[in-house]
Amino acid sequence: MRNQSKPVIEAAFMNVQTAAAYMGISVNTLYVWRHRRQGPPSFRMGPGGRVMYRRDLLNAWLSEQQQADSRTNPALNPLNKVPQRRERHRTV
């Protein structure tokens, strides 16, 4: 008899604890980012108003962060730019 595992279904929404674990950061950091409106988009869901994150928007935000980092985006790396030459000013 074959050992068939069931496919893992990823939830479309994550609570703060799950989203923080997914990103490898602390829950507190995620709350601070939310308070400062700096982090990934979030919303309140349900009668209790639980803070939730959509997995697709979280992945998109993480991708934007990666592209904005000069260490992972060669176009932003200052070492890949042609050095600028200073013009010599004439003194009168």
Image (spheres, rainbow, N blue to C red):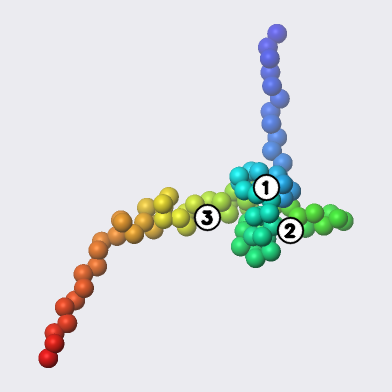
Q: Is residue 65 above or below residue 89?
A: above
First in residue order: circle 2 vs circle 1: 1
Residue lying furthest right: 47
Q: Is residue 86 above or below residue 29?
A: below
Crowding at dot 1, Cα within 10 Å, few <14 / some 14-19 / many 20+, comes out as: many
| Amino acid, disc 2 | Phe
Determine if residue 54 is in view. Answer: no
**Residue under the point 13% across and 87% down:** 91
CB-based contact (under 8 Å), mark 3 and mark 2: no
Q: Nearer the viewer, residue 7 or 30?
A: 30
CB-based contact (under 8 Å), mark 3 and mark 1: no
Q: Nearer the viewer, residue 66 or 26?
A: 26
- Which quarter of the figure is the C terminus placed in? bottom left
Residue lying furthest top: 1
First in residue order: circle 3 vs circle 1: 1
Describe the element under mark 1 as helix, strand or loop. Answer: helix
**Residue under the point 68% across and 18% down:** 4
Describe the element under mark 2 as helix, strand or loop. Answer: strand
- The residue indicated by pointer 1 is 19
Describe the element under mark 3 as helix, strand or loop. Answer: helix
- The residue indicated by pointer 2 is 43
**Residue under the point 86% across and 55% down:** 48
Query: What is the CA distance from the residue labelled 3 to the residue labelled 1?
Result: 17 Å
Q: Is residue 65 left or right of residue 55?
A: left
- The residue indicated by pointer 3 is 64
**Residue under the point 25% across and 63% down:** 83
Determine if residue 5 is in view. Answer: yes
